[in-house]
Image: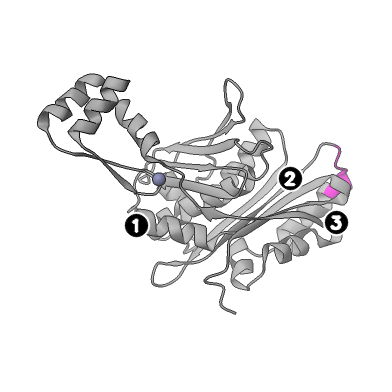
Amino acid sequence: MNTQNQQDYLIRATAADGMIRAFAATTRQTVETARQIHDLSPIAAAALGRLLTAAQMMGSDMKGKDDLLTIRINCDGPIGGLLVTADPHGHAKGYVNNPSVMLPPNSKGKLDVGGALDLGVLSVIRDIGLKEPYIGQTILVTGEIAEDLTYYFATSEQIPSTVALGVLMNRDNTVRQAGGFLIQLMPGASDEIIDSLEAKISTIDSITSMLDKNMTPEDILQFVLGEFGLIINDRTDCSYSCDCTRERVAKALLSIGRTDLEDLIREGKDVEMQCHFCSRKYQFTPGEIREMLDRA
Ligand code: ZN
């Protein structure tokens, strides 16, 4: 079966009479788009792809249509840091500070995402239209991202969770498979449910090998949670998508300050601004910058 052009999507589900909540996603197109936009090395594609996948699943859990989820990782490793945002409609975008990071494989022969991130802090920012966004933070425990988010949910949100995220690359460094799942226990889940879920999860294959067997998000949750009475509640298409506009980029340009902008006008050259998320370029002439300053 050719899955190369399959639309990315995620599903949300419940099991064990609502004591378990679950999400699963297939995100190959999202991660391949990110790879092409940012010319990502395989490790950078794996790291950003895992984070984009997590953000799409976590974003789909927000209630308001204008809510925005941001996950930021500040770290000491050679990748230098990552940032992704996602809305509740399956749209995500992001970037890494060093897209060309390369490292030898780790001890398991896999892409060394943990080595690329090293020590750092993970922040989850939920802007749900209140005066201040809700911010939760934890340290990175492995830098492999899924484990770090598991730790984040346990410590910052007190939700016992299992997070699996994976990106598998082709030999030509394009993205072969990407996706993940997130399973959470609700307060009141019995020890019996917890023990049998843990036992089940300890037996499953990696997310990338399940995806590479052409298992769909539905198949994956059925496999993990089928014995708990899985109910799939909804399905959302997801994609890499940037909503930047000339107006927003102009605002960012203004934020560099009047003195510096006056200097740019004096130099008489066009100023080019590039969107961090999609690499789209926006040109501003000295006359346009003058006008913006006069209006500001
Ligand atoms: Zn953009």
Q: Position of residue 198 (x, y in %)?
A: 76, 52
Do the residues under discs 3 and 1 have CB atoms within 8 angstroms?
no
Do the residues under discs 3 and 2 have CB atoms within 8 angstroms?
no
Please tell me which residue lies in front, 286 or 191: 286
Please tell me which residue lies in front, 292 or 112: 292
Q: Which residue is mark 3?
A: 228
Q: Amino acid at mark 2?
A: Gln
Magenta stretch: residue 295 in it? no
Residue at image coords 82%, 36%: 187
Q: Is residue 134 visible?
A: yes
Q: Position of residue 104 (x, y in %)?
A: 37, 59
Residue at image coords 64%, 31%: 156
Residue 252 located left or right of residue 92: left
Please tell me which residue lies in front, 186 or 131: 131
Q: Position of residue 275 (x, y in %)?
A: 35, 43
Badge 2 marks a residue whose secondary structure is strand
Q: Amino acid at mark 3?
A: Phe
Q: Which residue is mark 1?
A: 39
Q: Is residue 40 visible?
A: no
- Mark 2, Cα crowd under 10 Å, few <14 / some 14-19 / many 20+, is some
Q: Which label is found at residue 5?
A: none
Tell me the mark number nearer the camera, choosing from 2 and 1. 1
Q: Answer above or below: position of 260 versus 144.
A: above
Which portion, as a residue range, is magenta? 188-193
Q: Which residue is mark 2?
A: 184
Q: Earlier in the sequence, mark 2 or mark 1?
A: 1
Tell me the mark number nearer the camera, choosing from 3 and 1. 1
Please tell me which residue lies in front, 93 or 168: 93
